[in-house]
Image (cartoon, rainbow, N blue to C red):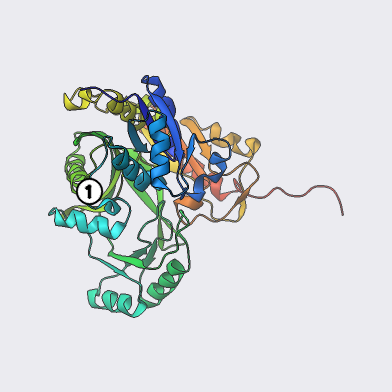
Amino acid sequence: MTGPRTVAVVDADGIGAHLPGALRREGLGCVVVRSDTPSASFAHERSEAGADVVHTGDLSATAAALRGLGVDFVVAGTESGVLLADALSAALGTPGNGMSVPTARRDKYAMAQAVAAAGLATADSLVTGSLPELREWARRRGEWPVVLKPRASAGTDQVHFCHDEQQVATAFAAIVAATDHYGTRNTTVLAQRYLRGEEYFVNTVSRDGAHHVVEVWRYHKALISGTVPMYDYEEPVPADDPGVRRVAAYALAVLDALEIRNGSAHTEVMLTAEGPVLVECGARPGGAHTPDVVSRCLGTNQIDLLARVIARPGELADDTLPRYRIGTPLRYVSLISQVDGIAPDAARLAPVRALPSFVELVLTAPEGSPVRPTVDLNSSPGYVYLSAPDAAQVEADYRRLRELERTGLYAAPVPTGGH
């Protein structure tokens, strides 16, 4: 089984920005494609990085350009590239994902339907553009809270946890008045049962319908303003953990249900009292993790393994890819601002970098730019990796980091001089 020669990465943003380099390390050529619906979250990154091919809406023209560049494999670098990568793979006749219902890999309602049709557990859901219908659905269920979100967005954008009918009405109005991160107006709202349990994510790579679990992490959430769950921190969980075995097996079944056959996936699963239930699945690399940090602690990472299975598919087929093992305890902490402020400068970040378990800090906004109160992942100022041989040190440094945030990390500088 041989691999391709030249790979196109659609929207190499976020963690996907690491993929062209990983592909080149495997000896493959790489072409970067810019979709016509990129996420606004990565506008700053895109201003510093060009694209070999810019898609302007004409699939045939973009496919012809890639064909002329010798592209024989197409993969999504981030969520905004998922549908275009699939369509280009189909147009070029290169290895891709199933195309019976490709929208199920972006539209969260179609996703739930496809997964349910495969006999897997999903959350009770409704899609509607009618507030009276939504209120009646919530009233009939009689179980609070309920979750409202757009059908196709990402990064917890416009996700609302509603505890009564008034909150349902407020959230409905906010969602339909907004556009998602890809510039599409929300005309309907997805309502779902609130899932209780432990939430995990499963990062995978796939080739020709075979799958490999790269890593499994567990989310820990905190309440923002007393009511809104926000991703607080996440940690990898050992592969032999009983909960991990259950959610990993479920996640692989979700990949089959969604016809994810080539590329990568990030599948979020709630382990409820009744068993694993899908939160959502993205047919692209997972989240904002820094690959080399993950490799230092787990021995492998999703980006490098994705490049590897593209270049050498036989390794997945023969089950010879490396398995993750947790060495040094690792924690990925989402930064949370409770105030309007500014992104901190080097001096203000010095106490963070001085934490004994500090590994890496990534800010999502340039130094000195405005920071708003954090309400979701997209409004988080960034993230910090903590790692140490002693898990107690990681916990102590995490608490110190939160204290620094509460006591002025994002405070605007006090003006000096003048009258």
Q: Position of residue 177 (x, y in %)?
A: 47, 69
Q: Position of residue 241 (x, y in %)?
A: 20, 37
Q: Residue at x 28, y 64 (%)?
A: 192
Q: Classify residue 139 as left or right of residue 171.
A: left
Q: Classify residue 61 as left or right of residue 412.
A: left
Q: Is residue 397 visible?
A: no
Q: Residue furthest left?
A: 119
Quarter the C terminus occupies: bottom right
Q: Residue at x 45, y 58 (%)?
A: 180
Q: Is residue 154 above or below residue 193?
A: above
Quarter the N terminus occupies: top left
Q: Of 226 and 362, which appears nearest the observer? A: 362
Q: Secondary structure at mark 1?
A: loop
Q: Is residue 305 above or below residue 257?
A: above
Find disc 1 in the rendering and name its residue.
Answer: 258
Q: Of 356 and 74, which appears nearest the observer? A: 74
Q: Of 75 and 282, which appears nearest the observer? A: 75
Task: Give the class, few, some or many, for how many residues have Cα within 10 Å of label 1's Cα (few <14, many ≥20).
Answer: many
Q: Position of residue 407 (x, y in %)?
A: 58, 49
